[in-house]
Image (cartoon, rainbow, N blue to C red):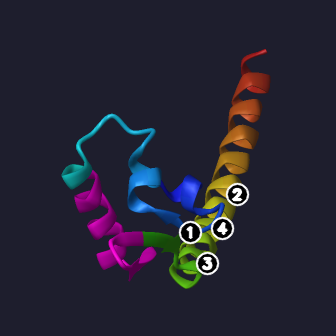
Amino acid sequence: MVARLSNGPVSTSALARPFAMALPSFTQHLGVLESCGLVRSKKNGRVRTYELAAKPLKAAEAWMSTRRATWEKRLNQLDAYLMTMKERKS
């Protein structure tokens, strides 16, 4: 859903089309995303359109970037340690 919404706003029915689930269940999923602030919806007549909310996604991206940097450092340290252990055995 999020990947599709990254292309721009889309109606509920168009967004649900590729998924094998009932529309009420699908709208519940959208409701969770909306309550988390990741998407916003607008209703025009009988059509509800959803779009991504960029601000929370940017915050999540910043958090993940920090975590990625930490794990890359740790994995590099592990790699160096394992290479040292391998050299000692040889």
**Which one is in front in this view, the residue at disc 2 or the one at disc 4?**
4
Distance of mark 1 from mark 2, alpha carbons? 38 Å
Q: Decide which of tag 3 and tag 4 comes sooner along the chain.
A: 3
Q: Residue furthest bottom?
A: 55
Residue under label 1: 9
Residue drawn 63% across and 76% down?
62
Residue under label 3: 58
Q: Nearer the viewer, residue 31 or 47?
A: 47
Q: Decide which of tag 1 and tag 2 comes sooner along the chain.
A: 1
Q: Decide which of tag 2 and tag 4 comes sooner along the chain.
A: 4
Distance of mark 3 from mark 1, alpha carbons? 18 Å
- Magenta residue span: 26-48
Residue under label 2: 73
Q: Residue 5: image x %, image y %?
A: 56, 61
Q: Residue 57: image x %, image y %?
A: 55, 74
Distance of mark 3 from mark 4, alpha carbons? 10 Å
